[in-house]
Amino acid sequence: MSETVAFGSVRTALGNILVGVTEAGVGWLAFGDGPEERERAEAAFRLPVVTDPARTGPVLAQIADYFAGRLTRFEMPIDWRLTSRIQRQVLGTLFDGVGYGEVVTYGQLGTRSGAGVPAQGIGQVMGSNPIPLIVPCHRVVASNGLGGYSGGSGVEVKRWLLTLEGSIPATLDWDPERGP
């Protein structure tokens, strides 16, 4: 039997999240689920699309549990086929070595991965991560601040995820009329 990809989505506090899961594991995650996003994923995989809730269900359940605060480590097989050898080395180091509530700088991740990629290159690897959230590129920050984020609506999504994980404090809800 040939390889296939199954898509599924789950509603979260940040909107719908789309996943693409092959027989090997999850290989795609997107903040948003619409025809354009599914077309991009289909073009990336170049595999027949099937409906397989048994395959996508466990991944979607873990994502829902993460957003509900019940999950701190994704435990699922990863399909790295949409990454290069260097991306796989860096993203694999991130997936295996930077846990919930932790952050690492781009430079630190470059050193840890042993890939010989400078901090700026690590930023490019993070920006091309096909499985954000699960492979937690939001946990990689600049040495002088949050850095960028290409998931969802950008750096505000990164800030939201890091706040959820307790890596950064929630912002003060302050109204000048009533105070904090």
Image: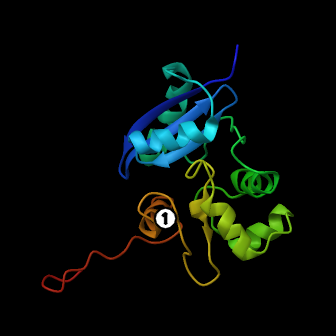
Q: Toward the viewer: 18 or 113?
A: 18
- Residue 113 position within the rendered picture, expressed as x and y whole percent measured from the top left: 82, 62
- Residue 14 position within the rendered picture, expressed as x and y whole percent measured from the top left: 37, 53
Vertical order, 115 against 143 (above or below): above
Q: What amino acid is at disc 1? A: Lys
At a point 40% along the width and 37% down the height, the residue shown is 10
Q: Quadrant of the N terminus?
A: top right
Vertical order, 18 against 111 (above or below): above
Query: Quick one: which residue is furthest to the top in this view?
Result: 1
Q: Quadrant of the C terminus?
A: bottom left
Q: How many marks?
A: 1
Q: Is residue 137 left or right of residue 31?
A: right
- Residue 13 position within the rendered picture, expressed as x and y whole percent measured from the top left: 35, 50
Answer few, some or many: residues within 10 Å of disc 1's Cα (few below 14, many 20 plus, some between 14 and 19): many
Q: Is residue 9 left or right of residue 131?
A: left
Q: Which residue is mark 1?
A: 158
At a point 54% along the width and 75% down the height, the residue shown is 146
Q: Toward the viewer: 31 or 76?
A: 31
- Residue 60 position within the rendered picture, expressed as x and y whole percent measured from the top left: 48, 34
